[in-house]
Amino acid sequence: MRLINVRPSRRTGLFLACLPFIALLVAYAIGSAVRLEANPADKLLPGFQTIADAVNTYAFTQDRRTGDYLLWADTQASLTRLVSGLGIATAIALVVGVAQGVLPLARAALAPLVGFISMVPPLALLPVLFIALGLGETAKIALIVIGVTPILIRDLALQAGALPREQIIKAETLSASSWLITLRVVLPQVLPRLIDSLRLQLGPAFLFLIAAEAISADAGLGYRIFLVRRYMSMDVIFPYVAWITLLAVVMDVALSQLRRRAFPWTEIRQ
């Protein structure tokens, strides 16, 4: 049998999925042991016990100055900014992207502008945002919106424009207006794509969030990572990076489940 036709069982698939993570942990443990044996004060690859102590301090011990549990306070601050930015970006992208994909006049007017904005490196605008909007929450949320929205718009516009023309013609023969065609024909078919696009933009959104928090914030996951880096506190940085990754994975899975439940007809049956 050719390897291209071999499909693993559920148990084998789970084992294969876990294998790379186990290999990474083993490699880290070996590297940490070697470095700590040569220098017990080494901070680059702290031992698992040191990392566990740091997690206990930041997640389960109240900070003496603020009384907060720092990990959870940072998580709340970061997720508030992230969800706000993604929510605004999604709303703008849905309106502009569908209009650009359905209406030729909107496409002619907006496509060049959106294409131009999508090529601007969002991080290059961060100083401009801080100068124009101040160092508060508005600039951080605006960076996420500017970084994510143009890509979502272009993706939705392409999806809406790629719909079979026959569907539009059939709706027109039934006397459907442009608004009704958009609402009943186009929108149900682009919403699943919007969720998929949003999933793909989670990584860039976290990048913009962390960059903004690193420059100006008093709480947040990015703020904490760049605060402790001056002390080379890798025992704090590693758990925070792992936690950010876990949050992104959970959000990705949640969006995937939302898409599957809200639009079951789009799932590919094997």
Image (spheres, helix red, strand yellow):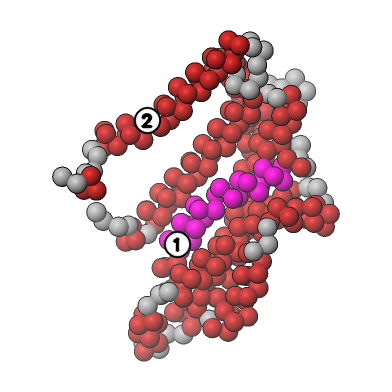
Question: Which portion, as a residue range, is magenta?
Answer: 191-213
Relative to residue 153, is residue 180 drawn left or right? left
**Which corner quadrant of the image does residue 237 belong to?**
top right
Q: Is residue 128 above or below residue 41?
A: below
* N-terminal label among 1 and 2: 2
Q: Which residue is mark 2?
A: 19
Is 41 magenta? The answer is no
Q: Residue furthest front?
A: 38
Q: Is residue 34 above or below residue 85?
A: above
Name the amino acid, label 2. Leu
Q: Nearer the viewer, residue 183 or 152?
A: 152
Residue 56 visible in rendering: no
Is 192 magenta? The answer is yes
Q: Which residue is mark 1?
A: 193
Position in image of residue 173 (x %, y %):
36, 89
The residue lying at 57 percent from left, 79 percent from top is: 107
